[in-house]
Amino acid sequence: MTVTTETTTSESFTKIASLDPDEVMTYSFIRDIPISGGKTLALLTLDNGKDHTRPNTLGPKTLLEFARVLDEQKARAARGEIHGLAVTGKPFIFAAGADLSKVSELPDRETGKQMAQLGHWALGKLGELGVPSFTFINGLALGGGVEIPLNSDYRTIDSSVPALALPEVFLGIIPGWGGAWLLPNLIGIENALEVVISNPLKSNRMLKGPQAFELGIADAMFGPANFIENSIAWADGVINGTTKVKRPNEPGKIERAIKWDIAIGVAQKTLESRIGKVAQSPYRALELLKAAKNTDKRTGFAAEDEALADLISGDQFHASIYAFNLVQKRAKRPAGAPDKALARKVTKVGVIGAGLMARQFALLFVRRLQVPVVITDLDQGATDAGVAAIHKEIHDLLEKGRISPDESNRLTALVTGTTNKADFADCDWVIEAIYEELEAKQNVFAEVEKFISPEAVLATNTSSLSVEQIGAKLEHPERVVGFHFFNPVAVMPLIEVVKTPHTNDETLSTAMVTAASLRKNAVITKDTPGFVVNRILAKVLGEAMHAVDTGTPFEVVEESTRPFGLPMTPFELLELVGLKVGAHVLDTHHKAFPDRFFESTNLHRLAELGHIFERDSKGKAKGIDKAALKIVKGGTTPMTASELQVRIEDGLADEIHRMLEDNVVAAAEDIDLCLILGAGYPFQMGGATPYLDRVGASERAFGGTFHTPKIVGVN
C-alpha cells in the first residue's frame, strides 16, 4: 500500500531511518527574510556542516528533518507568520540526492519501496504549505537535489550552476521522488525524455544553469554575484502578485493529445536500436513518462514507488553501483601505481607518426599539457599534412567556441613538425603511433634513442604487439612503457598502461601522472597479448566467427550476445574497428593461445570483401550482405543462440580467470574498469565479472566466483 501524506507520520519510517546509523546529516536551517508589504519569506538552507567538497545528501534522517521543519513552517503559515518559503543550499552546492552507496545496501524490496515513499512524503510537503514554495538552485543539483525544486511551486537558478541532472537511469534506477511525473508535466515530454533518459545514457551528460533554464526547469535565472538577493526579490514579486510566471514549455492539450505518444514511440525505438532490451531502468522510466500524460500526481508517485522498489532490489542496480564505485574510486587510485613523486616532469612531447591516430595524440597532449608538441613522419609532405590537420582541429575548436582566440593562437604555435629526429632531443616524452609492425616500431625507437636523454620516456600505443619486444633494440629498455589509447582518443576515457619486466618505477609513475594530466583513467596491465580489453573482445569475436564458420547464422550469433547488454553486436564491432584489424587481432591471440582462440580464414576473406552488412544510402544496416553469406557458407555444425551464449559466457569466465591467475591486472575490478571505460560495457551489467557470476559461468568455468554475492547483487 502506498504511503500518503494523509496517513503518514515520521514514525512510519522509523525502520528505514535506523538502517544508516552513520548518515551524514544535511540540516534544514530556517531564517526569516522580510519582504515588501510587511510580509515574510522563510528561507530554508540545506547544509551538512562540511566543506564544499562534501555535497549535501538526502538520507532518511535528513528527509525526516526536512519534513519536520516543513511541518513547522506550514503551521506558521496558517498563523500568518510567513507568506512563502524558499529552499536553497550551502555555497556552491544545492544537493546531490540520496547517498547511493547506502541505497544499494537496502535489505529488501519493501525497504526500497519505503525509501521511495519517504522521499515523496517529505518533498511533497513543499506543495502543501498553504503559501507559495520556491527553490533557489544555487549550485550542483543531482537526483533528489533536482526533485526538491520540482516539488516546489516556483524555481530560480544560478547561471553558474555547473551540473544539474537526473542521473538515475545511468545507475540502473529511475527518478523516484517525483521526477518522472513532475518533470514532463512541467517542461513537456520531449524535454523530459532528454533529461531523464537521453542524457544519462550519453555518459551521464549534465545540464548547466542556462540549459536548465532554457528547458523550463527554472522560472528565472540570475548571475552568481547576487543570486540569493535577486531570487528573494523575484519571489517577493510572485508572492505580492507583481511578477507573472510564464512557462512556454509546459505541455498543452495538443501535446498531450498527439505529440506525447509519438515522442514516447520514437524514444522506444531509439532505445531498442541503441542499447537493446537488456537494461531495465530506461524502459521503466519510459513507462512512467508515458503514464504521466493523463494520471494525477498521487497515481504517478505511487507508480514511481513501485518502479523504484523493483529496481533497487534488482541485480542491475547493484551492478551499476559496483561500476559507479569503480569509476569514481578505484580509477582514481590505480592499483600498482608507484609514488607520484617519482614522475618526471613532461615539458615537451614528441609524436612519431602523422596519421590520424598520431594527430589525435598531438592534439590531446597540447591541449591538456600546454607544452610544445613536435611530430614527425617519413617525409616532409606527410609531416606538414599532419601539422596542418592538427592546426585545423584547433581552429575548429575556436569556431565552436570551446577555446578562446588567445588559446587557439597559443596551441597552434606549440604544434610543429620535423623530419629531423634531432629536434626530439629535449623531449621528455615520446610516443609512437605508426602501423602495427614490430620491426618498424623497434627501428623508430632505436633511431630516436640516439638523440633523447636516457631518462626520457618512450611510449608505444601498440594494441597487440609485445611492448618488451618493441624496446628490445634499445640501450635503455627501462624507459619503455605501453600507453594504449582507445578510439576516438578525445572521447574514450581509458588508457592501458603496460608495464614490461624492464619498465622502472620512474617511467611507470611518469606514465600514470601523464595519463591523469590528460584527464584519462589509467589501468596498469602486464605485457601480454591484447592486454585487457582486446583480449576479452578477441574472445567474443573469435567465438562469434567460429560459430559462423561452423554453420551458425549471423543473426543467431547476434541474438546470442544480446543478453550481455553490449553497445553493439560482434559483427558491428568488427566493421567499426575494421575487418583487417579484427583479423589481425584474432591471429595474434590464436598464435599466443592456440588452444583457446580460433583463427578464421573466413574473417580474412570478409576483410578482403570490406564489409559484412548490406547498407542503405544512409549507411544503416539492412541485413547481412549476400557476398558475406557466400563466403561463410558450408558450415555443418550450427549452434542455437542459447548454446552459443553459454559457450561465450564460459569462455569469458575461463579467460578472465586465467588473466587474473597470470597477474595481467591486480584484480577482477580492474578487468571491469577497463571494459566499462574502454569497451563501452554498460553500467547495468557492472562490467563482465559480476555478470558472469550472476549467470553461473564462473562456477561452471573454474568452480568459484569473482566476487561475493553482495557485490554482484544476487538476492
Image: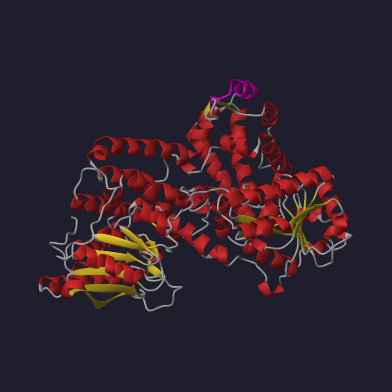
Q: Residue furthest right?
A: 450
Image point 47% across, 40% down: which residue?
274
Q: Nearer the viewer, residue 60 or 696?
A: 60
Protein image colouring: secondary structure
Visible residue check, residue 482: no
Q: Quadrant of the image for the C terminus?
A: bottom left
Q: Quadrant of the image for the N terminus?
A: bottom left
Q: How many marks?
A: 0
Relative height, residue 28 to residue 247 (above, below): below
Horizontal and vertical percent for residue 384?
A: 78, 46
Give the residues in magenta: 623-635
Q: Is residue 283 left or right of residue 205?
A: left
Q: Nearer the viewer, residue 384 or 4?
A: 384
Q: Nearer the viewer, residue 227 or 456?
A: 227
Does the stretch in magenta take in 306?
no
Does the stretch in magenta take in 630?
yes
Relative height, residue 446 to residue 123 (above, below): above
Horizontal and vertical percent for residue 235?
A: 25, 66
Horizontal and vertical percent for residue 89?
A: 35, 71
Q: Nearer the viewer, residue 124 or 652?
A: 124
Image point 23% across, 50% down: which residue?
300
Q: Is residue 636 left or right of residue 228?
A: right
Horizontal and vertical percent for residue 207?
A: 42, 56
Figure quadrant of residue 613: top right
Q: Is residue 114 left or right of residue 462?
A: left
Figure quadrant of residue 125: bottom left
Visible residue check, residue 140: yes
